[in-house]
Image: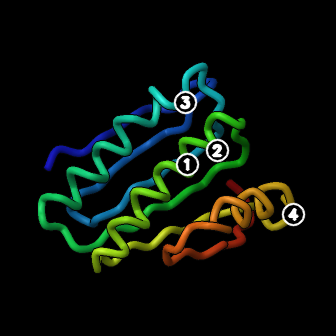
Amino acid sequence: MENLNLEATKYTPEIKTDSGNAEIRIYGSSYPENANEFYRPVSEWIENFLDEGNHKLTVNFYIYYFNTSTSKSFLNILEILEKYSEQGKDINVNWYYTEDDEDSLDNGERLFMEIDVNYQLIPVDSI
């Protein structure tokens, strides 16, 4: 499957998918004008990847700032992952946050509140 690679801009994060290692990496800040449109290819890639018979996917979020519309897009992605997890796929989500950034930790906790998917909140020195 072809990988999706989006370079970071002033308003959007870098997004790299790796079908060989069954991973997605979302890195940076996210406040695009239209988050729904920006994240649509990511959602589509996830669904295509898992529909093609792949049984495992890890999504790594390294986000230090995001706006409300991005939050909704992240929830949409997590709901897709939850659906596949319920079908028996091995779905793992890692939310990386800087140890001294309480807001990033709180944001990660809020995102996973109502989502039933395997996740970890992982402190790091810097993002």
Q: Quadrant of residue 114?
A: bottom right
Q: Secondary structure at mark 1?
A: helix
**Which label is found at residue 100?**
4
Residue closer to the observer: 101 or 72: 72
Residue identifier under label 2: 71
Residue at left offset 33%, top offset 50%: 17
100 sits left or right of 36 in the view = right
Q: Secondary structure at mark 4?
A: loop
Residue identifier under label 3: 35
Residue at left offset 29%, top offset 41%: 4
**Type of amino acid at the residue the image marks with label 1:** Phe
**Type of amino acid at the residue the image marks with label 3:** Ala
**Which label is found at residue 74?**
1
**Type of amino acid at the residue the image marks with label 2:** Ser
Kindly report the distance in space between the C-alpha atoms of the residues bearing marks 2 and 3. Answer: 9 Å
Mark 2 and mark 3 lie on one chain; the one further toward the N terminus is 3
Kindly report the distance in space between the C-alpha atoms of the residues bearing marks 2 and 1. Answer: 5 Å
**Neighbour class for label 4 at 10 Å: few (<14), some, many (≥20)?**
few
